[in-house]
Image: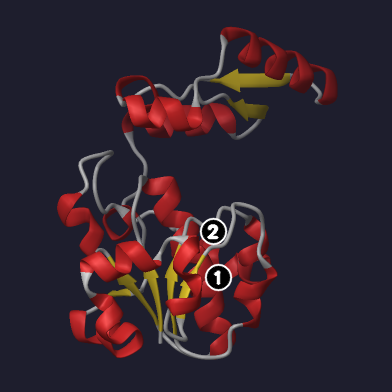
Amino acid sequence: MVISQLIGGLGNQMFQYAAGRSLALKLGTQLHLDISGFASYGLHQGFELKRIFDCTAEIAAEREVRNILGWQYSPIALRVLSSHRFALFRRKGFVVEPHFQYWHGLSNLASESYLVGYWQSEKYFSDVTAQIRQDFTFKLPINGLNAAVAKQISPINAVSLHVRRGDYVNNPITTATHGLCSLDYYRNAIRYLAAHTTHPHFFV
């Protein structure tokens, strides 16, 4: 089987799921999700993927993770060996994203794997897009304000403008890592999109 380690907010969980699902489909096997990291994770809303979407992946049991990682399953070993400095010591099947750009190596894996990373590229699942979209079907129908906004979006050239604050402002480590977008950044983005699209309607 393929096991994806999930951590982060919903967007991160979606990428981690999609990359693992794509690999599992390629190998003709199951995808399971390791959500054990959320037990000590204080950011965002915790594990949300299966609460919001109709995805079919099961939660990985401890024995299933051990089957792939062996003694490297322990929290300390897992944390240490996830560092790129210790890549040579990882068991076969213990796969850590080497960088934030698309990595061709993921599509070349040929056996059961435990995936650690964010996998933030649509290239990881571009050949199974229809399946991923189906997996990300909302469990509940939209209603209320969401339904009203969806009705507004449907007939027009809608542009979503997301202003990220939250932990980017309140968490010093996150702020130091990612920084903050200035007001000029958003103004320039709006000007760019307005120049390259026809009648854009911005939803903030």
- Where's residue 62, x and y in %? 19, 79
Query: In the image, what residue occupies the spot 48% across and 74% down?
Result: 95
Res 119 label: 2
Q: Which residue is mark 1?
A: 131
Question: Disc 1 on helix, strand or loop?
Answer: helix
| Front residue (pair 175, 54) | 175
**In this view, 56 is above or below 137:** below
Q: Residues within 10 Å of mark 1 (few under 14, many from 20)?
A: some
| Front residue (pair 88, 40) | 88
Q: Residue furthest left?
A: 39
| Residue kind at label 2, given as amino acid type | Trp
- Where's residue 116, x and y in %? 43, 65
Question: Disc 2 on helix, strand or loop?
Answer: loop
| Label total for image | 2
Query: In the image, what residue occupies the spot 80% across and 25% down?
Result: 197
**Residue 73 is drawn in which quadrant?**
bottom left
- Where's residue 115, x and y in %? 44, 71
**In this view, 138 is above or below 131:** above
| Residue kind at label 1, given as amino acid type | Gln
Left or right, 41 with reference to 168 = left
Q: Are marks 1 and 2 in contact (CB under 8 Å)?
A: no
Left or right, 136 with reference to 73 = right
N-terminal of the pair, mark 1 or mark 2, is: 2
Left or right, 34 with reference to 31 = left
Query: In the image, what residue occupies the spot 44% across and 58% down?
Result: 137
The Cα atoms of the two marked residues, 1 and 2, are separated by 17 Å
Query: In the image, what residue occupies the spot 33% across and 54% down?
Result: 7
Left or right, 149 with reference to 35 = right
**Residue 94 is drawn in which quadrant?**
bottom left
Q: Residues within 10 Å of mark 2 (few under 14, many from 20)?
A: many
| Front residue (pair 90, 58) | 90
**Residue 202 is drawn in which quadrant?**
top right
